[in-house]
Image (spheres, rainbow, N blue to C red):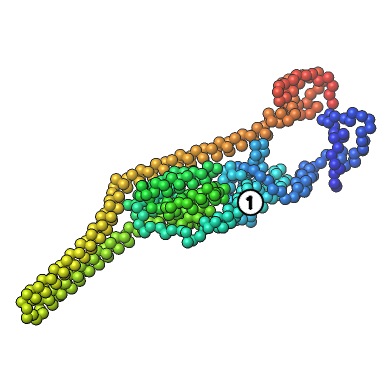
Amino acid sequence: MKRPPFDPTFAQGGLFDQPAHGDAKKTSMPNEAARPLQVSEAAQLVGDQVAALGKLSIQGEVSGYRGSNNSGHLYFSIKDAQCVLPCVVWKSKASSIKIALAEGAQVVVEGRFNYYAEGGKLSFIVDSIRATGQGDLDAKFRLLCAQLKELGYFEESRKRALPMLPRGIAIITSASGAALQDCLAVAARKFPSVAITVIDVVVQGASAAAAVSNAIHVVDLAAKRMGIDVILVTRGGGSREDLDAFNHRLIADAVYNCTTPIVAAIGHESDTSIIELVADLRASTPTAAMNRILPDRDELRQQLDYANASLRQSLLQFCQTKSRALTQVSSRPCLRDPAQLLLLPRNRLAHLNQEFQSKMLARIDRARRTTLEMSSRLETTSPAAMLGRSQAKAHATRHRLDMSMNQVLARARRDVQAIQAQLQAVGPQGTLARGYSITKTSDGKLVRSVANAKPGDVIHTILADGALQSRIEKGG
């Protein structure tokens, strides 16, 4: 049976003030209202009211995300400064969640409230999740793409080819990020002689765009002096908000105006950012970027060996050709004029000798320059250079470990604070603060019924801010 709406004028026990005037509305309560509800009936009322709320969108901060359990469901909470709301994503919806439910992430969840009567628990059943402001980010990205395309920032004709053998590479990224370690590992394996300069910058947040664009400008100005032939801007994966700094006009202008070839590798292969569209080359990952920039050391050795063998073969053929020419000159019939007989071979021989020396000196000079260049680059693979890179890698790993531990401790501290707030809400002191009290007899027993005390007994009433002592004058 449907219950009538609540009317405070019929509340018992003085919890609500009675009407001040006699003309207040007076109605009689149905007999059904006087009957106490069963727990299941009350739960049904709550469930009906919760279901009537329909589909809602709620914004909050992710808290207590534990990942998927054996059932495949996702459990977490969203909270604000005052309240915490438990949330559930059923297994059938979990695969459609595309954002990372990291601790502290600001999200908007869409779904319905559910009251689990058997356990007396209220939760929010989530159908979809999106990051706060994601729609704004997409609109801003599309608008900037249209503007830059109109200005010619994406034209392939303006993009430059990478040098075949770069002298040095500048990597603009976070020194504590995994992306830098991936780049250094590829360089050490593939071509350790290349000089690498790391520019440590912030790669996410409000200041990231200005930091990255300024780093590109400074490196470009000093590129010739420092022997830098390629600039790599990179960072690892993250949410759309984490990568949004690389969709800024400041960075697009810096890359467009840069005179040094730029490679961009931001996020994962599925991520696309403005800087990748403007850069001379876009790579799917930091590892792929270094593989595109650096030549293979073993292949270069093979090419050098081939060039050396080809030079030797050409020199041998040249010597054989000149030898045959001299033989032909010496075997010609004698001329009538003895002076001409002596002059012709001498001039021919002098000409051939001069030509031979000129070509040989040119070939030797080219071979010497190539050998010196390769020798200087291979010298950088010495144990001292490799030790320095290993020490830098160890330092960066230790820094990343310290940051990870600080994040773990921060998450644990927030979890403890949330549990503490829940315990305070359901504890005795929280109950007393809401207007309830605890009554005991003089010997410390709880007074649960009027039968536990009789007239003349002294009772003690505990309130939120103190205690009262009183004597019973009338009971029953």
Q: Which residue is mark 1?
A: 135
Q: Amino acid at mark 1?
A: Gly
Q: Is residue 63 left or right of residue 370?
A: right
Residue drawn where x is 29% and y is 45% of the image:
384
Residue drawn where x is 63% and y is 48% of the image:
133
Q: Is residue 286 left or right of residue 274?
A: left
Assign the C terminus to one quadrant of the image.
Answer: top right
The image shows residue 340 at horizontal and vertical percentages of: 9, 76
The image shows residue 347 at horizontal and vertical percentages of: 13, 71
Q: Quadrant of residue 323?
A: bottom left
Relative to 79, say whether 357 is above or below.
Answer: below
The image shows residue 444 at horizontal and vertical percentages of: 71, 23
The image shows residue 389 at horizontal and vertical percentages of: 35, 46
Q: Is residue 22 left or right of residue 188?
A: right
Relative to 296, say whether 28 is above or below.
Answer: above
Going by the picture, which residue comes out furthest to the right?
A: 23
Q: Residues within 10 Å of mark 1 (few under 14, many from 20)?
A: few
Residue drawn where x is 67% and y is 38% of the image:
83
